[in-house]
Every structure is written in C-alpha cells, then in structure tokens.
C-alpha cells in the first residue's frame, strides 16, 4: 500500500512537471565530459561528417542534422569539399525505469529507441500502466584531424527524464556536449540547457 501511494504521488508530480514544461519550457540537465589532445584544435575549423559502416541508416542523417547547429555555434564550419577535420556523432535513447516507479510492479510495454542505426520500436519498456515513461539519452561527438584521422576532441553528454521530444532534446544535448569547445574544463561537469516554448511528443 505504501509503495502504491508513493508511486501515485510520483506520477502526479511528474505529470504536473510535464504539463508545466509543455507550457513554459524546461531545463534539461546534462552530465558532460570532454577530452582534448595536444596540439589543440585551431582555425580554420572546417569539417565534414564521418560515418562508420554501421551508421549508414537514414536515422544517422537526422542525428547529424540535430548536431549541426551545436557544431556551428561552437565555431566549426561545415565544408564537405575541403574539410580540415571530420566529425562523428552518435546518439542513443533507452527507455528506463522512472525514479517514481515501483520496481515490484514492473510491466512490459512499448519502448522507442534511437541509436546510430536509427529509430526502432520494441516490446519491453520498463513502465507499467501507472508509470510515467522515463528515458536515458546519450550523445557523443568525436573530432578527428584530416588526413591523419587522429582524434583531437571527444565529448559525451548524458541526460535522463520524461521528455520524448527528440527534435528538441537531442539538439540541446549536443549543445551541452559542445559547451566549452575547444577548451573545456577538465573532468565531469553539469551543463543545463533551457528548452523553451511549447514542446511536442
């Protein structure tokens, strides 16, 4: 009984949070860590996207489109014809257990995933009929110097929350990942990005 009451309270709180976020925007919390090699990146910072053999699915183009504004804001300039660097981006969305969920009342459900192969749907989402869906997301950006392909910059961002607006959340996460480029502070850090306006799911 106590677990059920706590669970219903959590659902009510999260639902209010979602409704409030849709009307006024919300703060997306990101855990970020970046790595720089010597010598540092210098101008001109022209780049092209690089894809692994496993990244040829259509979803990769969407992921690159979400990353492009953050790369541009960081000072990188897209130049497919004469790039100085290559940029590889990855992203992943995993349905996970809400912090308000009762682990003893787990039910299977539908989940949606996004990774470097693209979007996919499948059974087994970790929420029951009274749980608010919760998602763990990860993005990464790797910058390599051309033509040597030596890695000169690597950055990662992770975020957890109820938001399913991928078109808003993934670009914000790439912005968080590129925060401080090309001279980020050392070690893990928190980078919060305000996502304003009405969100859609």
Image (spheres, grey):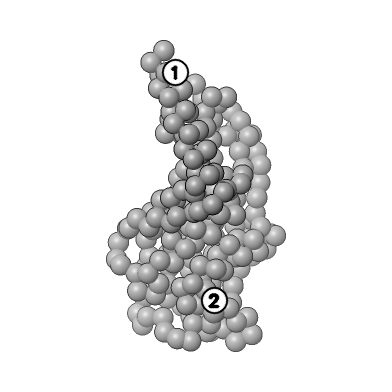
Per the image, the residue denoted by label 2 is 86
Number of numbered discs: 2
Residue lying at 64% horizontally and 85% vertically, measured from the top left: 81
> Splitting the image into 4 quarters, where does residue 192 fall?
bottom left
- Along the viewing direction, whichever of 2 and 123 lies nearer the viewer: 2
Q: Is residue 108 left or right of residue 196?
A: right
Residue 93 visible to an observer of this rendering:
yes
Q: Vertical placement of 70 versus 17: above or below?
A: below
Farthest top residue in view: 1
Q: Position of residue 201 (x, y in %)?
A: 61, 44
Give the structural element (helix, strand or loop) at label 1.
helix
Q: Vertical placement of 20 versus 65: above or below?
A: above
- What is the number of the mark on residue 183? none
Residue lying at 60% horizontally and 87% vertically, measured from the top left: 82
> Splitting the image into 4 quarters, where does residue 66 fall?
bottom right
> Splitting the image into 4 quarters, where does residue 102 fall?
top left
Q: Residues within 10 Å of mark 2 (few under 14, many from 20)?
A: many
């Amino acid at each position: 009984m106590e677990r059920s009451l706590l669970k219903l309270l959590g659902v009510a709180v999260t639902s209010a949070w979602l409704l409030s976020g849709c009307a006024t925007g919300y703060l997306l919390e990101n855990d970020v860590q970046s790595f720089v090699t010597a010598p540092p990146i210098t101008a001109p910072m022209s780049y092209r996207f690089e894809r692994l053999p496993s990244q040829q699915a259509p979803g990769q183009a969407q992921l690159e489109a979400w990353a492009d504004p953050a790369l541009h804001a960081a000072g990188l300039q897209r130049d497919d014809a004469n790039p100085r660097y290559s940029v590889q981006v990855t992203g992943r969305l995993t349905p996970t257990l809400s912090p308000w969920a009762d682990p003893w009342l787990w039910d299977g459900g539908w989940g949606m995933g996004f990774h470097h192969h693209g979007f996919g749907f499948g059974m087994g989402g970790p929420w029951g009929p009274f749980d608010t869906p919760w998602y763990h997301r990860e993005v990464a950006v790797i910058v390599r110097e051309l033509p040597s392909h030596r890695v000169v910059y690597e950055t990662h961002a992770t975020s957890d929350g109820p938001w399913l607006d991928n078109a808003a959340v993934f670009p914000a996460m790439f912005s968080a990942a590129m925060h401080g480029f090309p001279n980020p502070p050392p070690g893990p850090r928190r980078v919060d990005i305000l996502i304003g306006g009405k969100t859609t799911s």
